[in-house]
Image (tube, rainbow, N blue to C red):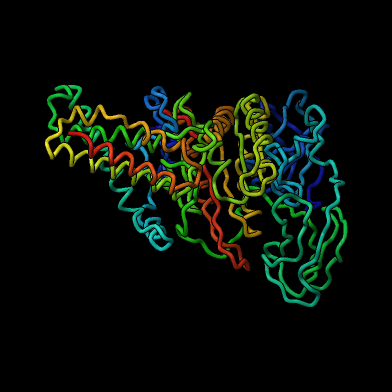
Amino acid sequence: MTEPVTAHTQRFVRSLWTLDRELAYARHYPAVTWVGSFSRDIEALGAWHARNGDPGWARRRRQVVSILAEADRLSALAELVGVGALPGRERMVLLAGRLLREGVLQQSALSDNDAYCGPGKAAALIDLVLDVVRACEERVDAGVPAATVEELDFSPLLRAREDVGRDDADGVRRHRAAMLTRLEELS
Amino acid sequence: MTSDAGATGGRVLRVNGPLVEVAGLAGVAMAEVVEIGPDRLPGEVVRVRPDRLTTQVYEYTGGVRPGDPATRLGHPLAVPLGPGLLGGVFDGMLRPLSVAPAWLTPRSLRIADDRKWTFVPVATEGMDVAPGAVLGTVDDAGPIAHRVLVPPGVSGRLESIRSAGRCRVDETAATVGGVDVALVEWWPVRRQRPRRDRQESAAPLVTGQRVLDAVFPVAKGGAAAVPGGFGTGKTMLLQQIAKWCDADVIVYVGCGERGNEMADVIAELGELTDPRTGGRLADRTVVVANTSNMPIMAREASIYTGVTVAEFYRDMGYDTVVIADSTSRWAEALREFASRDRRAARGGGLPRRAGLRASRLLRACRTGGHPGRHRGVGHHRRCGLPARR
C-alpha cells in the first residue's frame, strides 16, 4: 500500500473495499475484508437510514463489526490453546462470526436470488443471525454444552440468502421461528 | 473551437515512443492539441519550452520522423458529448469502437457523425434560460430520456428553438443569447464541468452487495477504491456493482485491461437484462475501452474522458457511476511517459506527481448539482487497484 497512486487514493476516497487474498482463496466472495476496509460515511448514512424507515441500521452494523473483530481475536487465540479450552460464551462468539461470514457477508454472484440483495432482505438476514446467536448464548448460559449448540444444523440459516427472493425480507423472517424452535429443543 | 494563430510551420524534432518533441510553433498553450505528421496524429502538449514543445501522442507513432509537419489546433483535448453515447463502446478519446471497421485509423477522429435523432423542444422561445436549463429531449437515444441542456457559460434569452423533428448532432437546436446550441457539445476532458453546489453524503448508493450496503456503505457523490491482489475478484465485484447499483447511468472505463477481459465485460453487459427497465443493461451503459494493446497515452486520457461523460449525464439530472478498472494501469501510462521524458521516478517507478494527479482526479469526481438543475445528484466513481505492498 506504499505505492503513491494507492496511497493517495486511500486518502481521498470515502470508502475503501480491500479485497483479501486469503478470503478469496477460501472461496469467500466478495472477498472484501472487514479488517482493512473502511467507510467514512457511517454516521451520515446511519442517519439517512433512520430517516428512511430503518432506525436499526447503525446498531446492526455496530454489532456485526464487533462480532467479526471479537471472533477474529478469539480464533487466533483458539489456534494457540484449542477451541475446547475456551469458555462456552466465547465459543458462541466464534460461532457467531462463522454464521455472519457464511450467512451474510458471502454472496453468490452466480445465484439468481443472491446476486442482488435488497436492503430489507440484508437487514432481515443480519437480524436472523443476531437473534439466533442470542438464543445460542442463552442456551449455553442455561447449561447446554457449547459443543452441542455448535453441532446444530444451521443450514436453513446459511441457505436463507439463496433460498428466498432478492427483496423477500419476510421469507427470511420465516426461517427465524424454525431455527429458534430447534434451539429451544436442545438440552 | 479553432484559432488560426501560428497554424503552420511546426516540425517534429524528436520521437521517442508516444513522446514527440516539436519546434517552430509559437504561442502554444499547455494541454493544447497539436496534430503531428502526415497522418495528423493528435498529441497533447505537456511541456512548453522556449524552443520546443513536448507532446504526448494518442496514436502509434511508428513512421513519424524528424522534420514531419506539426499543426496546432488551438484547443485542448475535447470530446463530443451528445445523444448516442449510451450503449456504445468508445476509445479513450470517445471515438466509437462499436462501429469502427477493423481498427481505428488515425483520421477517424474527424469522421462526421451522420446519425439523426428526434429532437423534441421543451423550452419555449423568449424564455430567459440559464446553464443547465432543459431545451428539449431526444427520445430515441436509449432507455433514459436524453435532455438537451443549455451548456455551461451560455445564458440569456432563448431566441429560437428548433421544432420537433429529426436532426443531426451538429445542427443548431436552439439559439441562446446569440450562441448556437447544437445537440452535441464539445467539452475539454481535463476541465471539470461546472456545478452549482456539492452535496455531502445525501443518500447511500445501494449496490445490492450485503458486505457493502450493510457494513462498508458508500454515499451517492462519494468515491470508493477497491484494492486487491491478482485473482481476488476485483473485476467481478465491480461488475456486480455495475449490474445492480441504483444509478441511472453506468460509465465503465476499462483502463489498460487485457482485450479479452474487456470483451468479456462487454459481452456480459450485452446479455444482461436491466432489472429496472426490462431492456438490456448495456443500453444505459457507456463503455470507454482502452485495452493494454491500444496506444498508452490514450489510456491516460481515458479516465478523464469517462468522468467527463459521467458529468454530462449528471448535468441532465441522472445518478451516474464511474467505474475505472484499473487506476494502477492508468498510473503505468504516467510512468511510461515520465521515463521517456527523463523525469525522476519515485515509489514504484512512478513520477513524482502521479499520486497527486490520482487524488486530483478523485476530488474532481465528487460532485453535486449542476447550475439550474432542481434535482441534486451526485456521481460516483470506483477504481480497481491491484494491491502493491
Task: Say how many tags the image has.
Answer: 0
Compared to B131, does B142 lie above or below? above
Compared to B238, does A45 lie above or below? below
The residue lying at 65 percent from left, 54 percent from top is: B313
Work out whether residue A185 or residue B207 is closer to the camera in this orientation and state it.
Answer: A185
Q: Which x, y percent locates residue A25? A: 40, 22
Work out whether residue A178 or residue B207 is closer to the camera in this orientation and state it.
Answer: A178
Dividing the picture into quadrants, the one containing residue B39 is top right
Q: Quadrant of the C terminus of chain B?
A: top left
The residue lying at 36 percent from left, 36 percent from top is: A157
Asked if residue B308 shows in the view, the reply is no
Asked if residue B214 shows in the view, the reply is yes
Work out whether residue B189 or residue B315 is closer to the camera in this orientation and state it.
Answer: B315
The residue lying at 71 percent from left, 36 percent from top is: B22
Q: Quadrant of the N terminus of chain B?
A: bottom right
Compared to B264, does A54 lie above or below? below
